[in-house]
Image (cartoon, rainbow, N blue to C red):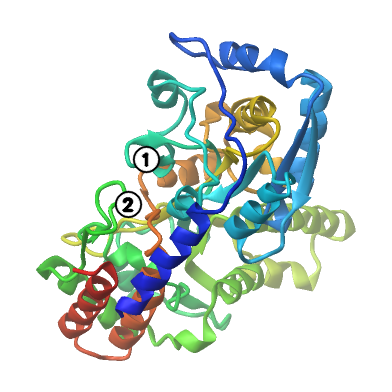
Amino acid sequence: MKKYLAFIIATALVLSCVGCGTKNSVETKKGPVTYESAMESLKDEAEGKDVVCWYTDETDKAWIEAAAADFNKKYGVNVKTVAYDGVQLFEDINSANQKDEGPDMYIMGNDRLEFAKTGGVLSENDVLDEKFWNENYPKTSVDALTYKGKHYGYPVYFDTYCLVYDSNLLENAPASIDDILTFLDEYEDTGSTKAVFRWDVADPYINTMFLASYANLFGENGDDMTTFSINSEKEIEAMKYFQSLSEYLWMDKNNISHDTIINRIKEGTLVIGMCKSDILPVLYEMKSNAATTEEAGTEENDETENTEESTKEATNYTVSYVPSLTSELSSTCLSTTYGAFINPYGKQTAAANMFALYLSIENQANQFAGNGKLPVVNQKDGFDDMQTVLYAQYQNSKPVPKVMLTGNYMLESAMTFDNIWKGADAAEELNKLQQSMQEMIGK
């Protein structure tokens, strides 16, 4: 397994040694920072300049283009948005830097922070002070964008997961998976062939909820590659519980994915599901369609034969918090915070910082409408009930680790979860995972 570590080190050395020209930095006034004072400190150098921003998620296109247009109208700075569709983001940024064509900024998740920093394409945030971070952003996002004690980029939106349930069948959301099993024992299917509880059991990102309360995943801040522990008694107990669900729920993981969960919800054939944040736009669309159908049906004929049947099968899905495992075993979900990050070798550093800060603060009210992703900054009354729940879930989540071995953990743990789900000894499998990760770490 040491070959993985050797590969990572070799890649990091290549990236960090690439000649990229002269670094740019932003000089800001000392003292307490506000959004207005930060924007003012950048305005003179940024005005009239052209900023190049790379983004990697195609669903961000409409949102970021609209934000760029509004930013240009308000601040006189033109933003050229570029959809990056490659697979070696940091290598390609470095290559573009060498040609003096690198982006001034880019959008990425916090899980790639160490790659970006080691690759030499990440600037420390020297615009905002500690007070600003703590007063304007939830701790989860501050932790997510902190690496080795320093802040990088500007938090914009996030992804996590939540519980989705049919409130027509459950008066209250289950507080634990044990509660779900109790409901399953009492539930009588009336012919609608509903599955009671499903999640993508092959996804290590979601499955880590069974371990994250007790495991040490690369240190408290997820940035210490030498710190990893996942095979204590509590983790073993949690994995034994995970395994018991395989026997109880009769789920074939090969036939379940995030997409199939969403499709079951759309069809109304699932009572409870664990879903990622992108379920929210789906639920809003379903509610809108249901309201339109009901209105049309009422106008046509309130007493048609189909009305009784459609009412009988009607669903009313809403979101709740990820449940604990049992009354004794807790759960902790992961989250990914996406931010706007500054390329130290970009041509327009001040303008890039200005647009990144704009996305992070001023444009947050437009975030969900733009790309269906919730903003990092709390919108309070601007959030509806479901958004408020998902935001609270994010606040209580653990940021996905940002070390370069995070991908290796996801790959190795996926095999561990799979083996345990199929009946392998939980302690033995966690010990194998621990040993495998330690070999990569080099301990």
Kindly tell me whether residue 34 is visible in this rendering: yes
Query: What x and y, as percent, mark residue 167?
Result: 50, 57
Query: What x and y, as percent, mark residue 185?
Result: 33, 78
Quarter of the image containing the C terminus?
bottom left
Amino acid at dot 1? Asp
- Residue that sits furthest to the left in the current view: 233
Image height check: is 55 above or below 212?
A: above
Q: Tell me how many marks there are.
A: 2
Q: Residue at image x 30%, y 61%?
A: 176
Amino acid at dot 2? Gly
Image height check: is 282 above or below 257?
A: above
Foreground: 12 or 166? 12
Marks 2 and 1 sit apart, C-alpha to C-alpha, by 9 Å
Q: Residue at image x 32%, y 85%?
A: 421
Image height check: is 312 above or below 360?
A: below
Question: As drawn, is 413 to the left or to the right of 24?
Answer: left
Question: As drawn, is 231 to the left or to the right of 33?
Answer: left
Q: Image quarter for residue 170?
A: bottom left
> Element type at marker 2?
loop
Disc sitting over residue 306 in the figure: none
Kindly tell me whether residue 160 is visible in this rendering: no
Residue tagged 1: 143
Question: Mark 2 or mark 1, which has the lower sequence index?
Answer: 1
> Are discs 2 and 1 less than 8 Å apart at CB?
yes
Residue tagged 2: 222
Question: As drawn, is 119 to the left or to the right of 148?
Answer: right
Q: Image quarter for residue 309?
A: bottom right
